[in-house]
Amino acid sequence: MDFNADYTMTIDGRAITTPGSIEVVNPATGEAFAKAPDCTRELLDQAVASSKAAFKTWRKVPLAERQAMVARAGEVLIANADELSRLFTREQGRPVAMAHTEIMGAGQWLQQVARMEPPVHVSEDSPTQLIETRYVPLGVVCAIAPWNFPVTLSMWKVAPALVAGNTMVLKPSPFTPLCTLKIGELFRDVFPPGVLNIISGGDDLGPWMTAHPGFAKISFTGSTATGKRVMESAAKDLKRVTLELGGNDAAIVLPDVDLDAVAEKIFFGAFFNSAQICVATKRLYVHEDVYDGLRDRLVAIARAVKVGDGADQGTVIGPIQNKRQYDRVMDLLEDARRNNLTLLHGADIPQGGGYFVPITIVDNPPESQRVVREEAFGPILPMMKFAEIDEVIDRANDSDYGLAGAVWSKDVNKAMDIARRIETGTVWINQNLNLRPDTAFAGRKQSGFGVENGTDGLLEFMAPQAVYLARG
């Protein structure tokens, strides 16, 4: 693939260039390697107008035909996964094989969501009247996707919104716009013009979109701080919102676990994608009886995995995706050093301009430390001892976030009891990072607002309409 090729936006089914551009940086080198279009206000207006016009006809397309087109989009994504994965690694940093897995998985996600359909609830069906509640599309959706899983989290929005009968203007992160723009090119032959517009731009574009009066709904994935600004912007004209935000996810390890069986699963549940996952384990609570054994195993894994450029053979953990996040993670690491916390590092990191951070386990820090209280979103894992179940549940729940959590134990009943007491939208038992298109994903507290995935996620893109029919 020619990484320096021209990248275009998709508006009304056509390739659109812009007067200005934004640079796209390879996080493994810290150097720009391509340019993406920088959308203007006028082009944003065109994209919204195109989607608004398309909505008039798209909403009337029979559900089965919309489903077939979304499924076809999944096939196109899968067919182009090899080429897209190399571009993905160049802009996002993740090793190529794992990039390929994301693109294939996103294609399969489209195909599975394409089988969903909204329910119809019948309250009464009698000789005197029929009362039914059906679900109808909202209109034009504003979708804003993040840089950590740029393809997957875009398709989480595209699939249900289009199946539901909405049209969409999608904006990828300015840090990772290229794969999404290329997908826009591929989808021009799948969807009618205006049904899915894809635009890119700098930091101004997101606020322009969330304030735009032409959108009926905003679907946003990103940080809690930005999510609050999105919700404030949406409030001005009461746009509907779905916000999938940050998490400081706790995992609890009970003393009956088989350390050799679970250590690698726990490690990658924390550090996969350089720990840039909203539902990654970010606080690890381990019973004091098995603490030392698990800590030593995790450090040994960290020292064995290769950290480097995702394009290089054998790389397991890539760089932090962008300089802004790299600086934040390094500041958290420096704060831990200033407070004399015990830091256990993994393998050496490449020297040079890339945004590499050593895999770091923080050995039993006080709960009050920033490295425990804040979401790192980088490869720094605080690991803490506990003695009593009630105490550790209180510690796990003592957070502004409530996205996900995990429990590790051979005693399934005890693990289920703990899971029910954890204040998060998702809890895993003896597994990690398992999300499905048919299962609701939602955050509590400051981790989000609304639902993605499952029937509940589909209905987030629809409005209930009660119809009363008099008979006789």
Image (cartoon, rainbow, N blue to C red):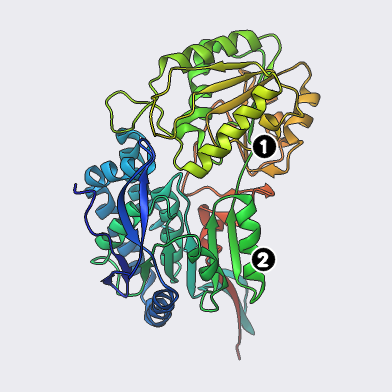
**Residue 143 spot, x, y in % from top left:** 48, 62
Q: Where is 402 relative to 366, above or below? A: below
**Which quadrant of the figure contains the C terminus?**
bottom right
State which quadrant residue 163 falls in: bottom left
* 251 horizontally vs 186: left or right: right
- Nearest the eye: 128 or 349: 349
Kindly tell me whether residue 406 is visible in this rendering.
no
Name the residue beneath numbered marker 1. 374
At numbered mark 2, what does the secondary structure look like: helix, strand or loop? helix
Residue 365's place in the image compared with 235, above or below, is above
Q: Residues within 10 Å of mark 1 (few under 14, many from 20)?
A: some
Q: What is the CA distance from the residue labelled 1 to the residue labelled 2? A: 23 Å
Can residue 196 be seen here? The reply is yes
Circle 1/circle 2 CB separation < 8 Å: no
Task: Tell me if residue 225 comes above or below residue 40 in the rendering.
Answer: above
Name which residue type carries label 1. Answer: Glu
Label at residue 259? none
Amino acid type shown at disc 2: Glu
Image location of residue 355, percent across then percent down: 44, 35
Q: Position of residue 37 (x, y in %)?
A: 34, 63
The residue tagged with tag 1: helix, strand or loop? loop
Q: Position of residue 43 (x, y in %)?
A: 39, 75
Residue lying furthest bottom: 472
Please tell me how crowded label 2 is: few (under 14), some (14-19), or many (20+) other residues with Cα within 10 Å: few
- Taking the spot 63% from the left edge, 35% from the top edge, the residue there is 249
Q: Nearer the viewer, residue 417 or 394?
A: 394
Q: Which residue is mark 2?
A: 232
List the single residue furthest toward the left. Answer: 1
326 vs 281, nearest the viewer: 326
